[in-house]
Image: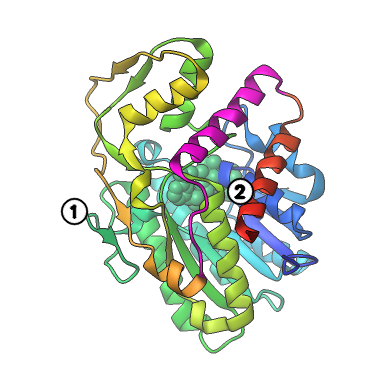
Amino acid sequence: MTFWCGKKVLVTGHTGFKGSWLCLWLQKLGAEVIGYALEAPTVPNLFKVAQVEENMMSIIDDIRNKDRLVSVLKKYKPDIVFHLAAQSLVRKSYANPVETFETNVMGTVNLLDAIRFSESIRVVVNITSDKCYDNKEWSWGYREIDSMGGYDPYSCSKGCSELVTNSFRQSYFKGKDIHLASARAGNVIGGGDWAEDRLVPDIIKSLIKIEPVSIRNPFAVRPWQHVLEPLNGYMMLAEAMWQHGEKYSEPWNFGPDDDHVITVGELTNKLSSLWKENLEIKKDIRKQPHEATLLKLDCSKAKLNLGWYPKLNLEDTLIWTTDWYKEFTWKSEGMKEVTIKQIEAYDKLRRD
Ligand SMILES: NC(=O)c1ccc[n+]([C@@H]2O[C@H](COP(=O)([O-])OP(=O)(O)OC[C@H]3O[C@@H](n4cnc5c(N)ncnc54)[C@H](O)[C@@H]3O)[C@@H](O)[C@H]2O)c1
């Protein structure tokens, strides 16, 4: 638990949903956190609502600005980097493929190239996605050795980001004291997400307004995990690379167990019953772009070699999520404390 105390950690994408949770957690563990990202992508956003900026250095700039990245690394001399900055939405990637590839692929290239010349950084975790895999629409979980792919621009950009990571690792970092891994997690849920076209934020918005929720495919089966689960994996991975180096400089899957896999319709009903409302589902019959069906990860490697396991069952995952939004809806103040309380509760589960 003392590992992070005093470590200088750069988080790209710190104004986003996952980045905000990660920065608060790192701050709590005593790390000196520096963030690099564009402004928060939604209004409201967790970054503001939970006052994440209060205890960190926040730099607002574009990951496509290589010169600024180089100067930030020079100035702040981080020890560890978590790369989360990305255009993170599948449907937006259909509308803006160039921006998606520039941000997710060239952004990764810019960052890794800047890191190449850093004298302080020892550990880098590139956060990609379970969508990086060539999805064969089968029911087995993908393993880290499976092929990269990606039908839509977002998924493909994450597959490309993986290939870029592998190339930089082999070409520049191997044999040097810079250890680089990638982390592949699936969709996460939790308080403070207001992204467009993500199911849980859509359900919560409808519950608050007491109006039907429009759902594309209520029968689609998806795995659901709390945002703190993969973040725990990213931190364990960084720690393992810091301590044992090259052995851990590889790709890693962090996904939920099979009993976290339920249909979109079931999830909607469970969330509305926790909210104590009867939410009506309206099927969205508009023509939709291609979307992957079930995509599962095989996380044996993380379990066996890192000792990482999901800590929350599905019920607690949903309770923690609705509890957070209830506090936000009915009190709206003190959300930093509410968020930190959940981090502390999760930290306790990690220790037990
Ligand atoms: N949320 C999920 O369910 C999920 C699932 C799998 C993988 N991921 C990945 O995890 C990471 C974080 O996801 P999130 O849900 O927090 O996303 P988010 O959209 O909430 O946040 C994205 C962050 O990236 C920043 N950003 C976007 N474009 C940028 C640019 N050009 N330059 C600098 N910063 C830029 C935003 O400002 C924000 O800080 C992303 O890489 C995403 O692809 C997310």
On whether residue 205 falls in the magenta region, the answer is no
292 vs 34, left or right, is left
Q: Position of residue 179 (x, y in %)?
A: 56, 77
Magenta extent: 307-332
Residue at 28 percent across and 27 percent down: it is 218
Give the Cα separation between the discs numbered 2 and 1.
31 Å
**Image quadrant assignment for residue 314:** top left
Q: CB of residue at label 1: within 8 Å of ligand 1?
A: no
Q: Position of residue 157 (x, y in %)?
A: 38, 54
The quadrant of the rendering that contains the N terminus is bottom right
Residue that label 1 marks: 138
Q: Nearer the viewer, mark 2 or mark 1?
A: 1
Residue 289 visible at all: yes
On whether residue 308 falls in the magenta region, the answer is yes
Residue that label 2 marks: 19
Q: Position of residue 255 (x, y in %)?
A: 41, 55
What amino acid is at disc 2?
A: Gly
Q: Which mark is residue 218?
A: none
Q: Tell which of 218 and 99 is nearer to you.
A: 218
Name the N-terminal-most of marks 2 and 1.
2
Q: Position of residue 203 (x, y in %)?
A: 44, 23
The quadrant of the rendering that contains the C terminus is bottom right
Residue at 57 percent across and 46 percent down: it is 18
Q: Tell which of 265 and 110 is nearer to you.
A: 265
What amino acid is at disc 1?
A: Trp
Q: CB of residue at label 2: within 8 Å of ligand 1?
A: yes
